[in-house]
């Protein structure tokens, strides 16, 4: 594989600077954001690079577990970060973490133990990127599904109460909204599976091919990842949407919007 | 012949201004009007009776306590008809299990109504259909929250008659919130006058 030197990256950065200057001249108001994002990108990725180097060399399961937990907690927090009608902080965090944990972690462990089977099974070179990809995608899915669910329930609260008033069971009342929320969360991953290879080359596969892996090998890994991500995302969304919709009604099947943090 | 019995009902937890306990019953075939200044909590009170809001105390339909049966079952028997109805599907027919000719006809609709679009309904049509929707549940007690507020005089009388017919046939108790004294005189035998710290029940004929 051809190694990149700092000079190579510097040349690439000239393009970003050119774009920043252009957008400044055109008064597009994104120059500052662009430069900050680019700098953050360099710092974050370099840090990760060094941390990964450290972990790969140590092969220590405890260190790996700690990193995995940090990743889980940050993802659990981020799920609730950009919601229109977010859940109360602690509730949202609890639901996010448990849905992520049950889907992403079990998927990653299963694919490590049963499918890829490196030795030992927790070999960080496989475990970290897999977990990262699963967490990232599942997080997106759960976040979208949650947003749709909370927003729909909040906006349709009068209709929901009307249906309860007529003696309908809460399952009957919420089932359509629930299905719609799961669908919303699944759209991105279904889209990217559908266009993979035709419109875009998936990032992971591109990376492997660039680093010299035979295309067919890269494709096999990519298919595995897609299946894992779809299943992880799907189960994660279903879990979180079910957990929230259960809490949206109290023990006497009354709509309980107290679990939402309504911004006034 | 069901009787609606309210024992020590208290909703101060959700409506602190209304700090009193309610203890009364509505006998089979009787209608109790509810009257009082607006904003006092009349609607909240009816919502609590339908178990749509948390409350202290207990409501009975004969000897069946509200808390002793699943909430949806209670709400199908003790049904609230709110002032403004809500519709969840595109067409009228999707909100009904089937078309029941006598009931629909009595409020001025024929079978074609099942195909009408909800967005094209007037508020009066919505309210009459909401009344049909509630009666098709075969409730054993009715909680009316100004159900005729959006209706013109003819439709108001028509709806009152349909409710009265159902009441006579099934001998159900009714609670009926209304600001319209004439309406209370037509539909109710007694009226609950609701104030902040106390309520009193008086014979309708005496107060009007």
Image (cartoon, rainbow, N blue to C red):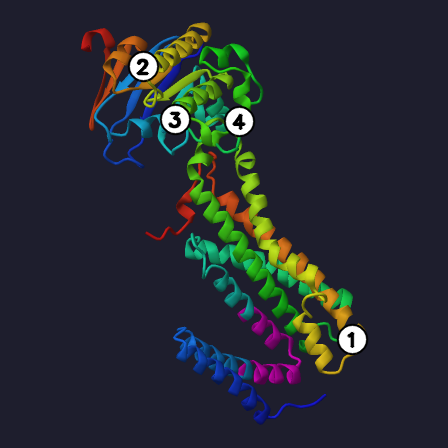
Query: Is any part of residue B70 visible from this angle?
Result: no
Marks 1 and 2 on same chain: no
Q: Are marks 2 and 4 in contact (CB under 8 Å)?
A: no
Marks 2 and 4 on same chain: yes
The correct choice, above or below, for A234 with respect to A20 in the image is above
The correct choice, above or below, for B81 with respect to A9 in the image is above
Chain label for disc 1: A
**Residue highlighted by disc 2:** B153
Q: Residue at x 39, y 26 (%)?
A: B123
Q: Tag 1: Cα neighbours inside 10 Å, few (<14), some, or many (≥20)?
A: some
State the extent of the magenta-drawn residues as a range: A47-70
- Secondary structure that dominates the magenta span: helix
Cα distance in 3D space between marks 3 and 4: 16 Å
Q: Residue at x 23, y 34 (%)?
A: B17
SS category of the residue bearing label 3: helix
**Mark sitting on residue B95:** 4
The correct choice, above or below, for A246 with respect to B79 in the image is below
**Residue highlighted by disc 1:** A215
């Amino acid at each position: 594989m051809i190694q990149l030197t700092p000079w190579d990256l510097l040349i690439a950065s000239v393009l970003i600077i050119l774009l920043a200057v252009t957008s400044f001249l055109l008064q597009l108001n994104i120059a500052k954001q662009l430069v900050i994002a680019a700098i953050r990108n360099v710092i974050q990725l370099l840090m990760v690079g060094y941390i990964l180097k450290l972990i790969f060399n140590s092969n220590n399961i405890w260190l790996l577990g700690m990193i995995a937990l940090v990743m889980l907690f940050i993802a659990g927090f981020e799920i609730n970060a950009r919601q229109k009608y977010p859940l109360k902080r602690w509730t949202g965090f609890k639901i996010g973490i448990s849905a992520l944990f049950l889907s992403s972690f079990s998927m990653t462990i299963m694919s490590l133990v049963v499918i890829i089977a490196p030795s030992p099974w927790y070999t960080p070179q496989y475990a970290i990127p897999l977990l990262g990809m699963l967490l990232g995608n599942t997080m997106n899915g759960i976040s979208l599904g949650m947003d749709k669910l909370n927003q729909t329930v909040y906006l349709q609260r009068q209709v929901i109460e009307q249906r309860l008033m007529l003696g309908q069971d809460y399952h009957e009342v919420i089932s359509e909204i629930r299905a719609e929320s799961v669908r919303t969360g699944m759209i991105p991953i279904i889209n990217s599976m559908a266009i993979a290879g035709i419109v875009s080359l998936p990032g992971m596969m591109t990376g492997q091919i660039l680093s010299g892996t035979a295309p067919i090998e890269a494709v096999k890994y990519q298919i595995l990842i897609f299946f894992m991500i779809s299943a992880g995302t799907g189960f994660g969304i279903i879990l979180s949407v079910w957990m929230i919709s259960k809490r949206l009604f109290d023990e006497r099947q009354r709509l309980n919007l107290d679990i939402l943090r309504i911004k006034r | 012949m069901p009787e609606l019995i309210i024992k020590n009902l208290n909703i101060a937890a959700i409506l602190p201004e209304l700090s009193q306990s309610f203890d009364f019953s509505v006998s089979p075939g009787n209608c109790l009007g509810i009257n009082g200044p607006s904003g006092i909590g009349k609607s909240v009170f009816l919502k609590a009776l339908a178990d749509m809001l948390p409350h202290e105390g207990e409501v009975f339909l004969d000897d069946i306590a509200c808390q002793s049966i699943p909430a949806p079952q209670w709400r199908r028997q003790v049904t609230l008809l709110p002032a403004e109805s809500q519709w969840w599907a595109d067409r009228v027919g999707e909100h009904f299990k089937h078309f029941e000719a006598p009931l629909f006809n009595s409020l001025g609709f024929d079978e074609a109504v099942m195909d009408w679009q909800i967005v094209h309904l007037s508020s009066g049509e919505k309210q009459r259909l909401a009344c049909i929707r509630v009666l098709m549940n075969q409730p054993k007690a009715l909680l009316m929250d100004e159900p005729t507020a959006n209706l013109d005089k003819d439709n108001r009388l028509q709806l009152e008659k349909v409710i009265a017919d159902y009441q006579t046939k099934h001998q159900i108790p009714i609670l009926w919130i209304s600001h319209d004294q004439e309406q209370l005189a037509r539909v109710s035998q007694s009226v609950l006058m609701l104030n902040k710290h106390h309520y009193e029940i008086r014979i309708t004929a005496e107060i009007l």
